[in-house]
Amino acid sequence: MSERRFDTNTRQTLERLSRAAPQRIDDTTTVTSPGAGTVAWAVKVKSNSSYNIYNVVTVVVGDAGAEPVEIGQQMQAVNLAEAFDQQGALAVGTYVAMFRVGNKNVFYAPA
């Protein structure tokens, strides 16, 4: 569906530009992204759930020298830097950037 929306937007833009008189065409830039874009959070690793799946909590990063503040409830996220068939070894208390990919939370942090 996102490809269809991209094609429609591109076609409409090109049609509009082709109908405009040559002296009226302004330089324009159009940026498109599939879906709504990437969503990311700063999180703190609370514990290992199983394999490379960790319990994490969202944090708010404050001023320099201030400890990040935990907010919200714990959720699970997958560490893509670790093997999927072995127990994870990432230290509790590690701060990482977590991304939402499909219906999963993921991050990349070498152990």
Image (cartoon, helix red, strand yellow):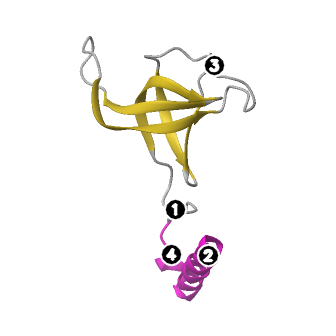
Q: CA distance from mark 1 to mark 2?
A: 23 Å
In the rendered view of the protein, which quadrant contains the C terminus? top right
- Asked whether 38 or 18 is in front, the reply is 38
Res 1 label? 2
Q: CA distance from mark 3 to mark 1?
A: 38 Å
Res 43 label? none
Q: Looking at the picture, does residue 5 appear above or below residue 29?
A: below
**87 on left or right of 32:** right
Q: Which residue is mark 3?
A: 110
Q: CA distance from mark 4 to mark 3?
A: 50 Å
**8 on left or right of 24:** right
Q: Is residue 35 magenta?
A: no
Q: Which residues are magenta?
A: 1-27
The amino acid type of the residue labelled 3 equals Pro
Which is nearer the N-term, disc 3 or disc 1? 1
Label 3: state its secondary structure. loop
Return the x and y of residue 48 as percentages of the image width and height: 54, 25
Q: Residue at x 47, y 78 (%)?
A: 24
Crowd rating for badge 2 (residues with CA inside 10 Å; few <14, some 14–19, many 20+):
few
* Contact flag, marks 4 and 2 (Cβ < 8 Å): no
Q: Is residue 10 magenta?
A: yes
The amino acid type of the residue labelled 4 equals Ile
- Asked whether 44 or 24 is in front, the reply is 44
Residue 106: image quadrant is top right
Return the x and y of residue 28 as percentages of the image width and height: 50, 65
Return the x and y of residue 81 as percentages of the image width and height: 67, 26
Return the x and y of residue 50 as percentages of the image width and height: 60, 30
Q: Residue at x 75, y 30 (%)?
A: 85
Q: CA distance from mark 4 to mark 2?
A: 30 Å
Res 25 label? 4
Res 29 label? 1
Q: Residue at x 50, y 49 (%)?
A: 38
